[in-house]
Image (tube, helix red, strand yellow):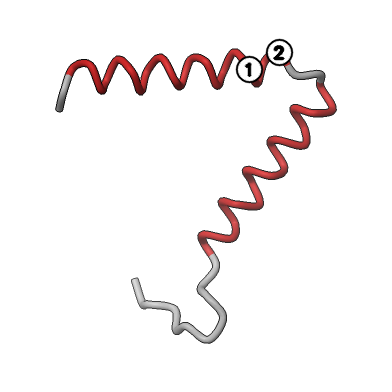
Amino acid sequence: MDVNLDQSDEAQGLRLVRAFLSLPPNKRAEVIAFVEELARAQDRPEAGAEASPT
């Protein structure tokens, strides 16, 4: 991997964390709920798609 790319990803992550922490508590809760819903949606099989056995 390119070192500059790794540093850029790390810097972006730190900016996101800083932005999240600067939000008021009610907005943080909205962000957490949104991300949790996205994670649940990825775990669900698509409509009409078969779940693959694990």
Q: Is residue 32 above or below residue 49?
A: above
Q: Residues within 10 Å of mark 2 (few under 14, many from 20)?
A: few
Dot 1 amino acid type: Ala
What residue do we see at 84% from left, 27% from top? 26
Q: Determine which residue is flagged by label 2.
A: 22
Q: Is residue 53 above or below residue 48?
A: above
Mark 1, secondary structure of its residue: helix
What residue do we see at 37% from left, 77% from top? 52
Dot 2 amino acid type: Ser
Image label count: 2
Query: Do the numbered discs 2 and 1 sit on residues whose CB atoms are within 8 Å?
Result: yes
Q: Residues within 10 Å of mark 1 (few under 14, many from 20)?
A: few
Based on the displayed image, in which of its 4 quarters is residue 25 positioned?
A: top right
- 14 horizontally vs 27: left or right: left
Screen quadrant of the C terminus: bottom left
Q: Residue furthest left?
A: 1
The image shows residue 48 at horizontal and vertical percentages of: 53, 86
Q: CA distance from mark 2 to mark 1?
A: 5 Å
Screen quadrant of the N terminus: top left
Q: Determine which residue is flagged by label 1.
A: 19
Mark 2, secondary structure of its residue: helix
The image shows residue 37 at horizontal and vertical percentages of: 66, 52
What residue do we see at 51% from left, 61% from top? 43
The image shows residue 17 at horizontal and vertical percentages of: 56, 18
Based on the displayed image, in which of its 4 quarters is residue 10 positioned?
A: top left
Q: Is residue 1 above or below residue 18?
A: below
What residue do we see at 69% from left, 44% from top? 34
